[in-house]
Amino acid sequence: MNESVTAPVIELSGVSKFFDQFQALREVDMDVRLGEKVVVCGPSGSGKSTMIRCINRLESHDQGRIVVDGIELTHDMGNILAVRREVGMVFQQFNLFPHLTVLENCTLAPMRARKLSREEANRVAMEYLERVQIPDQANKYPAQLSGGQQQRVAIARSLCMKPRIMLFDEPTSALDPEMIKEVLDVMVELAKEGMTMVVVTHEMGFAKTVADKMVFMDHGEIVEVAPPQTFFNDPQSDRTKQFLSQILSH
Amino acid sequence: MADAGTSTALAQRGRNAKKPPLLLLWERSQRSPWVASVQFAAFAALLLWLAMLGAEQMGYLWQWYNIPQHFFREVDGEWIMGPLVKGLLVTLQIAAWCIILTLAAGLVTALLRMSDSLTGSALATGYLELVRNTPLLVQLYLFYFVISPILGVDRFWTGIICLTFYEATFVAEIIRAGIISVDRGQWEAADAGGLTRRDAYRYVILPQAVPLMLPPLTGQIINLIKHSAIVSVIAVTDLTTEGRNLIADTFMSFEVWFTVAGVYLVMTVSLSFFVTWLEHKIKVRT
């Protein structure tokens, strides 16, 4: 595939998703280019989590096309695994493996899915644990760490797969306020290094700092897409205005 | 002003003050481990005395001194195994094979039942509902009189296969319950990391599910050992069969059945202790 800066690495066209009768996504179209940082926001139940979970097929879409890194997501398990190897994901609830140490959390997927040797996987893991500034916790178990540290481990764990794209699903929503900054700092660093990122978050300060593109969703639809400057200062849709006035009012 | 703790203590003393001293003493004695031990010993002694009394009334002649030779016996300076030990060895063999096969079959059934394959889950569900809802004894007769002659399997393996077939249904449900108790986020993290389903089970899900399964699995394996006595109806020479044959020879029904029950008890209780130790050892960190 052509890797020029303008080629989209994620393409969603006409994507719909149903949970029984409830339609979670309504013909969503979205492009993400290599190196682009996209921040997705919207009220709860607007379909933003569902949308990014479709990108690595944690949810399957019912209509439309999703192409990630040149691979179309279908029921083909080989394709799904290939996409998941290139796409890292960080969850709201961290989802670290509680029975494995921090280091083992970071080496499991590279050893199994990338077939790295243990030495190589350990080396890569220590490199990323240093990047998120917790190399000294490598032999502890997740339960022994604070929430902020756990989320940084989760980021390091994803990075160990050397993904081309990182998805963040409300990465700071389960954190105590004083731990949000340490996680956002890591994410800002990552953005500066040029990682392609799709971030679902309510942290508007973070969005203003790193986003190339803001996406506002409501009722399963993309309502507005704009650069942060326009999005925050001159929103076009009434629904966006209302949402922004609610979350920026205090 | 008294703080909350003191006022509670005062209220307690106030309530106790109204009770007669004998009642207080009785209530306090109920909490002592010594009193509990004496109560237990007294109850056990009463039961034993009733049993002895009953046997005496029947004119039963106790011959406990005759039992040890049916475990081991010295012939010409050589120790040879008596029928009870031979039977015990057969029971242990049956139990060992059944435990291994039951765990394997249970795991396969549970995984099939939870798989995306419609055929797989229909097969597993059909097997579960059919086998766990019919009596083991009837299944044993079916295997022994119908299936074994067709396939040419001997009675020892007929017993093992039939027991496995029956116990695996319960084990499958225990395993399934353990697996679905693991948080959904663990599956998602394994999937997002690009692990195959097999690797996700092996490295992420089962290591967390097994500690949850251990207590009910132990109960099921103890059941399996006890249920293995049923192979005596197809004349496999296990502990129960040997016990019955011994009674036919010696007429010591009380002593032999007590002894056989005791041997089963030793097997199952030691298994319980082993698993308690194992659980402690592999306790999952959370």
Image (cartoon, rainbow, N blue to C red):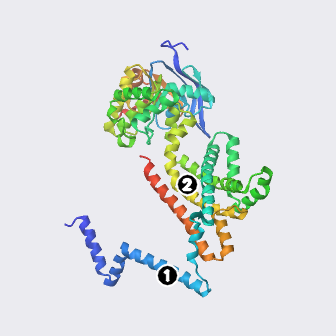
**Residue most toward the front?**
B76
Q: Position of residue B282 (x, y in %)?
A: 45, 48
Where B134 sits versus A73, above or below? below
Q: Nearer the viewer, residue A50 or A106?
A: A106
Residue at x 59%, y 66% (from the top left corner)? B76
In this image, A21 relative to A101: left or right?
right
Q: Position of residue B109 (x, y in %)?
A: 64, 47
Give the labeled residue for mark 1. Answer: B46
In this image, B255 relative to A92: left or right?
right
Do discs 2 and 1 belong to a common subunit?
yes
Residue at x 42%, y 24% (from the top left corner)? A231
Q: Amino acid at mark 2?
A: Leu
Q: Position of residue B154 (x, y in %)?
A: 74, 54
In this image, A106 relative to B121: left or right?
left
Distance from disc 2 to disc 1, alpha carbons, whole Å, reads 35 Å
Tell me if mark 2 has few (under 14), some (14-19) or many (20+) residues whose alpha carbon lies within 10 angstroms of its own.
Answer: some
The image quadrant of residue B243 is bottom right
Q: Position of residue B36 (x, y in %)?
A: 40, 74
Residue at x 67%, y 44% (from the top left corner)? B121
- The answer to whether residue A206 is seen in the rendering is no
Give the labeled residue for mark 2. Answer: B217
Say which label, 2 or 1, has the lower sequence index: 1
In the rendered view of the protein, which quadrant contains the N terminus of chain B?
Answer: bottom left
SS at badge 1: helix
Q: Nearer the viewer, residue B60 or A3?
A: B60
Contact (CB < 8 A) between labels 2 and 1?
no
Q: Amino acid at mark 1?
A: Leu
Where B189 sits versus B15, above or below? above
Q: Chain of mark 1?
A: B
